[in-house]
Amino acid sequence: PAPETRDLSAELNPAQHAAAAHGDGPLLVIAGAGTGKTRTLIHRVAQLIARGVPPERILLLTFTRRAAQEMLQRVERLVGSVSQRVHGGTFHATAHRLLRRYGQAAGIAQDFTIMDQGDAEDLMQLSRAALGLADQKRRAGDPPTKRFAKKETLQAVYSRHVNTGLELEHILGRDYPHFAERVDDFKRVYADYVDRKAQRNLVDYDDLLLFWAGMLDAPQLGATIAGLYDHVLVDEYQDTNVLQARILRGMTKLHRNLTVVGDDAQSIYSFRGAHFRNILDFPQQFPGTRMVTLEQNYRSTQAILDTSNELIARAEERFSKRLWTERAGGEAPWLVSAKDEGEQTRFVVDRVLELHEEGMPLREMAVLFRAGYLSADLEIELTARNIPYEKWGGLKFLEAAHVKDVLAFLRVLENPRDEVSWYRLLLLLPGVGDVTARAAIDAVAEAGWEASGLSRFTPPPKAREWHGRLATLLAELTRAVRRATPDLGAEIGMIRRMYDALLRERYDNAEPRLADLEQLQTIAAGYADRAAFLSALALEPPSATQDLAGADEPGEDDALVLSTVHSAKGKEWDAVFVIWAADGMFPLARAAGDPDQLEEERRLLYVALTRARHELYVTYPLNAYNSRMGADYSIDQLSRFLDRGVRATMQRVVVGHAAGEPQPAAPPAAAAGLDLRALLRGKFAG
Ligand code: ATP
Ligand code: MG
């Protein structure tokens, strides 16, 4: 039907309709996952337009740009292309637009430049150097505080300070205790940084929100900006912070037409200064608020909701909503105990292929995890088996700089003609620049592309030490390989004896990166030799930065989604796998000592479970002897959140048992006689 003739209210239940059709004044929709908050917001925008509100006087704020685009496309289906005039976007993008237009009146010259995080770090580096805090080399015996914080750390602490309003002392004490003594140096750097930004007419991301709030506080200018919109609507309000609430008060002071939707039980961004108090306090901050709650869930089966409800019912904070659906029944979610990480990976990949074979597009499935690095094993397996995937949130494991560095060592050993890898390796060495690297590669070439050619080259004095170390290492490795049966794990171990030191020099947050390498080493050890491993990785990896705008058209760009839970919020899939549901990983070990953080981890797991429409698998490795956490830390238990009551709503299965152990129950829908590789070749080749 033509958009105008469509009955907009038919697609909403009465409570949703009440919210969508609400007249003027503040409106709060506080409701659980999958109850149609986002859908209601879309309909509300459509109804405002249908009611005669000019689209360009509507502001729709979302958590990502992608979310705004998707929502406005759906508004367009309801009311047609006028919806394109609605202003939709993130808080930051909106701030940017307003600052360009009105910043001059507030002392920000119009041609300011936005700094991304990398730029901000570089400027921090300048400030750090100007104050003489850079390049203090630590000598043996010096206390760790001798070396000052790296630019990345300086930027991260600064941003946290601005966004949370927490004191620097507090942030350092908690996250960077080894710098706690140096709070005055941090302050000096930041004072200098702020001056530099002003002198150069630069604006960083954090400034965007601060300046927006500042403009709204100015009487005249504030009224002008607040006068731009008649209605402001916000999705995912539980993840806003106090600064954003202040901005919303300013934006709606003339008419108070503010609609926010959210779920306090899904508040997961406290590390950016968000707090679920913000949504609970909304009625006090905006007197006269109409509150609508929704309880009927349209996303998931009752079986999935039963598990989710059980989980959140145990939260410290009482979230009163209990979700229900008319879609009774459904298969109880699976709790999968895998023998180890490899078996966990195999289970997920096999099940994904089975579902795909049964007709489910890859795009309708997602694998979710607590932290970006937890998908490393899976990514390698997917790459090796040529299954397309895209990763949301967190860098793809194989694209992380430190992983690529170690792979470069392996590559030059495997193929000394690999100039790109040589170049990468040489530039890692302290004292080696472009010119030296080039000369060294020439020496290798002259030696007939033998790795040993490296030692025939004499670099300038400042590069000599590390150049020598590299030459020795490569010679040792070459010898070791000739002598013994290949042991790739040991090979990477030798490489790491040299590389780990370089890594510690380069990054303040060396620990998670070292953990990645530990992981790489473990995975590599499972391959017959270097060639087998490298060629498994060399299969064309899917693009890291696929545009997700086509998400509505399955078939195009069909790829499995791997996502951190944070990046999965608001989304839904037919089948969801939550991996690494082990204590220490979910919740993360670092949250264990802090009740607030633990509660946030629980909400995060709740967000993960409630993404599933039909099928939900929660997996964990039984004997994940976890190298990431240090040698003495082993994870052998299920996440504490999956206690007896939650487990009672799930079906259990053990996969990959060792011989002699009790026979496990059969995995769901075992694929007897299915040749997965043949299947894959058919699906993805050419
Ligand atoms: P989340 O808390 O995860 O962001 P949400 O409350 O925003 O969830 P939506 O994403 O809006 O929920 O809706 C969940 C699913 O239910 C969507 O597929 C949506 O189209 C569907 N849905 C919502 N309301 C209705 C309804 N009244 N009739 C049919 N389907 C509905
Ligand atoms: Mg939503």
Image: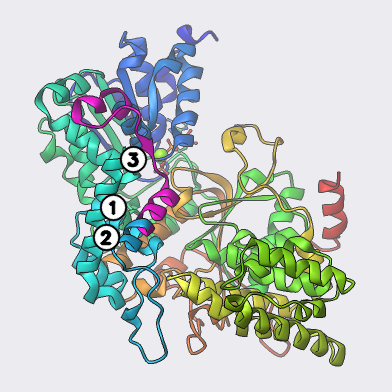
- Whichever of callouts 1 and 3 sits on the residue coming sooner in the sequence is 1
The residue at which mark 2 appears reads as 189
Magenta-drawn stretch contains 117: yes
Residue type highlighted by circle 1: Tyr
In screen coordinates, is 337 left or right of 590?
right
The residue at which mark 3 appears reads as 202
Q: Is mark 3 within 8 Å of ligand 2?
A: no
Question: How far apart, in angstroms, are the residues tagged by discs 1 and 3?
Answer: 10 Å
Q: Give the numbered dot on residue 193.
A: 1
| Nearer to the camera, 260 or 242 | 242
Q: Residue at x 27, y 40 (%)?
A: 209
Q: Is mark 2 within 8 Å of ligand 1?
A: no
In screen coordinates, is 327 left or right of 40?
right
In screen coordinates, is 432 left or right of 607?
right
Q: Residue at x 72, y 82 (%)?
A: 471
Ligand 2 quadrant assignment: top left
